[in-house]
Image (spheres, helix red, strand yellow):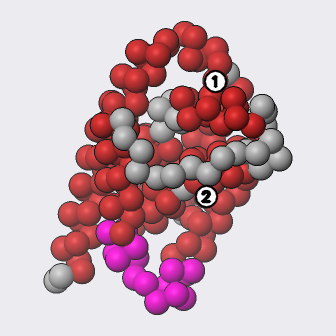
Amino acid sequence: MNFSLTETLSATMILFAVIDIIGSIPIILDIKKKSGVVYPAKASLLALILMLLFLFVGEKLILFIGIDVNSFAVAGSFILFALAFEMILGIDIFNNDDATPKTASIVPLAFPIIAGAGSMTTILSLRAEFDSINIMIAIILNIALVYVVLKLTSKIEKALGRGGVAVLKKVFGIILLAIAVKLFSSNIKVLFS
């Protein structure tokens, strides 16, 4: 395992765009309003565990099921496309179940908003390019940021205003769309070669 600051920063930025915790502030506020409470530590810890588990056993799991990594990455790119279109166009493609006070920090916050299909697919694709230690550090850095944002959601919304949050969501939607295109194009070639 080789630590690389460049790989760590790249993986951190890619995961930051995919997790899009800033763009999720409106969703988090809605969950908070519906359920009454969100537990930042609980949601962050569960998302961290899920992402680290997927980093180390995700590939073995999908191979056990009989799916190759490239097929999983292409399928994941479609999910990233959909998430990006949601963010850019302001439409709802994925249906979030109503959150209850007991489960809101787990479902839908920890999974699938923070550690969802997009994050899992991205982790697998990062494994093809970066060393595991760098991805692990990137995950930890992102979850630390997620925790801070969850603690300060209301203050961040007030500071950015509705317009600021909307602009950030669009910007990260475009970044996510570019990541989806790259993920799709680099893996589709392998499938058809």
Seen at 27% across and 70% down, the residue is 187
Nearest the viewer among 162 and 73 is 162
All told, the count of numbered labels is: 2
Residue 97 appears in the rendering: yes
Image position, residue 86 (x, y; %): 37, 43
Residue assigned mark 1: 153
Please tell me whether residue 104 belongs to the stretch shown in magenta: no
Lower position in the chain sequence, tag 1 or tag 2 = 2
Decide which of 155, 26 is in the foreground and name it: 26
**Magenta residues?**
60-74
**Residue type at tag 2:** Met
Q: Main secondary structure of the magenta part?
A: helix
In percent of width and height, residue 176 lies at 34, 44
Mark 2 secondary-structure assignment: helix
Location of residue 41 in the rendering, given as x and y in whole percent from the top left corner? 78, 39
Horizontal side of 159 relative to 185 (left or right) equals right
Query: On the image, numbered disc 2 is attached to which residue?
Result: 51
Q: Which residue is drawn at 36% across and 69% down?
A: 75
Q: Under tag 1, what secondary structure?
A: helix
